[in-house]
């Protein structure tokens, strides 16, 4: 009786199991709880079958065979259902794997598109910045060229003004030089007249000396300085007298009474330097500088003039020569 009941239970449970299996969807989308219920029902059938197998040996052979058949049927049904569920699970896993792969590829494509957009935007910004730098550089170049042009025009204007100023100074210096030339000529004439008077006085005094003196001592004569350089070089009372007489002239007093020059190169003004180089040194500034160094290295006026006139043959009546020698005289004036 117990075996029959168990068989009935097994059939009932098998019917429920079949009903559950038939209720599964055909698209393979099985919910996890449905799978768990199927597994639970299969376990129940297996437990009943195991219990049925433990019934006493006195059970009828047909009941035992039926139980064994039911158990075998349940086992096969369970295996088939498990295989089907496993296949469905594999199919679902494969489908999900495909979906994941598709999602990954879509994500990669989206990332690639985003990266391309970012690269395009960066390139656009770089091009814009490069264009801005080019425009700024062009503007800076134009501004620099404009500034150079303005500076060149300003420099040209100043150069013209400076040239005009120098021309005016040169013209004023030329006029002053002409005036000094007149004064120098008067100075030379006065040198000649005063030197002649001194010689006449000296000769007259010699003629009045006793004859014995003339026989015992050679007659001393006073040579007349032939050039202005010789007049500056000679350190005789007659020349001093002449200079003393000349210093009485108002137009010469400022020259001979001025302070001595300590540095000849610094004392010569730029306009005078240009005039000396052009008129006395044949426009050769190197000869001019060498001559100034030679004068500065001399011990006194005599040595300076000896060196100067040993290499120069200047016209002593020339105004520029007189102006230069006056500066040399002031350089060694004590």
Image: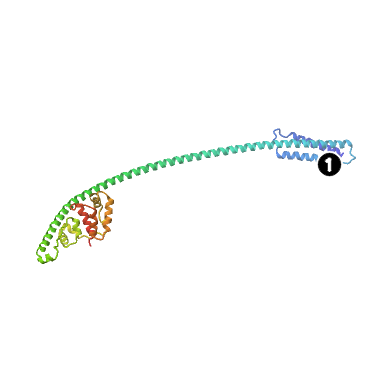
Residue 35 lies, in percent from the top left, at 73, 39
Quadrant in the picture for the N terminus: top right
- Please say if 224 is above or below 138: below
Residue 146 lies, in percent from the top left, at 35, 42
Place residue 267 in its image quadrant.
bottom left
Q: Residue furthest top?
A: 26
Q: Nearer the viewer, residue 89 or 196?
A: 196
Q: Nearer the viewer, residue 216 or 66?
A: 216
Q: Residue at x 45, y 41 (%)?
A: 130
Residue 145 seen by the camera: yes
| Left or right, 27 with reference to 125 | right
- Please say if 323 is above or below 62: below
| Left or right, 208 with reference to 75 | left
Q: Nearer the viewer, residue 84 or 33?
A: 84
Residue 30 lies, in percent from the top left, at 70, 37
Quadrant in the picture for the C terminus: bottom left
Q: Residue furthest right?
A: 58
Residue 322 lies, in percent from the top left, at 20, 54
Q: Residue at x 84, y 39 (%)?
A: 6
Place residue 157 in its image quadrant.
top left
- Please say if 334 is above or below 98: below
Residue at the spot of label 1 = 51
Place residue 329 in its image quadrant.
bottom left
């Amino acid at each position: 009786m117990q075996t029959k009941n168990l068989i009935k239970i097994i059939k009932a449970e098998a019917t429920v199991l079949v009903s559950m299996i038939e209720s599964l969807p055909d698209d393979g989308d099985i919910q996890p709880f449905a799978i768990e219920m199927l597994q639970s029902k299969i376990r129940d059938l297996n437990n009943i079958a195991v219990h049925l197998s433990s019934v006493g040996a006195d059970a009828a052979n047909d009941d035992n065979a039926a139980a064994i058949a039911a158990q075998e049927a349940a086992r096969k049904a369970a295996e088939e259902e498990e295989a089907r569920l496993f296949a469905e699970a594999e199919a679902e896993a494969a489908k999900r794997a495909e979906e994941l792969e598709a999602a990954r590829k879509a994500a990669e494509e989206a990332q690639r598109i985003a990266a391309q957009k970012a690269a395009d935007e960066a390139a656009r910004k770089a091009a814009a910045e490069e264009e801005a730098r080019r425009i700024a550089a062009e503007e800076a170049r134009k501004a620099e060229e404009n500034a150079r042009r303005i500076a060149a025009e300003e420099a040209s204007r100043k150069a013209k003004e400076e040239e005009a100023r120098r021309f005016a100074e040169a013209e004023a210096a030329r006029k002053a030089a002409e005036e000094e030339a007149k004064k120098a000529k008067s100075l030379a004439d006065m040198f000649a007249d005063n030197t002649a008077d001194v010689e006449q006085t000296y000769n007259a005094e010699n003629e009045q000396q006793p004859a014995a003196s003339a026989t015992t001592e050679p007659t001393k004569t006073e040579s007349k300085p032939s050039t202005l350089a010789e007049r500056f070089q000679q350190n005789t009372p007659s020349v001093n007298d002449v200079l003393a007489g000349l210093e009485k002239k108002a137009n010469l007093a400022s020259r001979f009474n001025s302070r001595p020059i300590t540095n000849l190169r610094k004392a010569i003004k730029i306009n005078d330097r240009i005039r000396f180089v052009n008129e006395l040194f044949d426009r050769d500034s190197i000869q001019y500088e060498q001559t100034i160094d030679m004068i500065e290295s001399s011990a006194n006026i005599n040595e300076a003039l000896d060196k100067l006139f040993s290499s120069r043959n200047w016209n002593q009546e020339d105004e520029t020569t007189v102006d230069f020698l006056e500066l040399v005289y002031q350089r060694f004036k004590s």
